[in-house]
């Protein structure tokens, strides 16, 4: 059975996305935008270059 997030419509997720984008713009040292269209290896390399501790 779908959980509460799986039941949400696309509008909900777009609102969440827009809020994260707003926060990232307001505080770029706290938030980092990841381009998920890249390969996992490219994403990992980008995060490693930021010295993010995962």
Image (spheres, grey):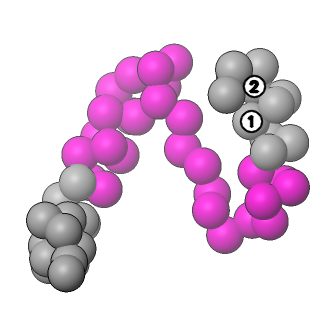
Q: Which mark is residue 50?
A: 2
Image vertical order of residue 48 relative to residue 10, above or below: above
Q: Is residue 38 magenta?
A: yes
Q: Is residue 11 visible?
A: no
The residue under the point 74% across, 36% down is 47
The residue under the point 40% across, 34% down is 24
Residue receiving disc 1: 47
Q: Is residue 19 magenta?
A: yes
The residue under the point 54% across, 35% down is 32
Residue 34 left/right relative to 46: left
Magenta-tinted stretch: 17-43
User: Are the residues tagged 2 and 1 within 8 Å (C-beta)?
Assistant: yes
Q: Residue furthest front?
A: 1
Quarter occupied by residue 25: top left
Residue 46 left/right relative to 12: right
Q: Is residue 28 visible?
A: yes
- For the residue labelled by badge 2, is the local secondary structure a helix, a strand or a loop? loop
């Amino acid at each position: 059975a779908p959980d509460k997030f799986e039941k949400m419509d696309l509008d909900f997720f777009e609102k969440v996305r827009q809020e994260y984008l707003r926060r990232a713009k307001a505080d770029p040292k706290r938030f980092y935008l990841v381009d998920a269209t890249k390969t996992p290896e490219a994403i990992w390399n980008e995060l490693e270059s930021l010295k993010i501790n995962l």
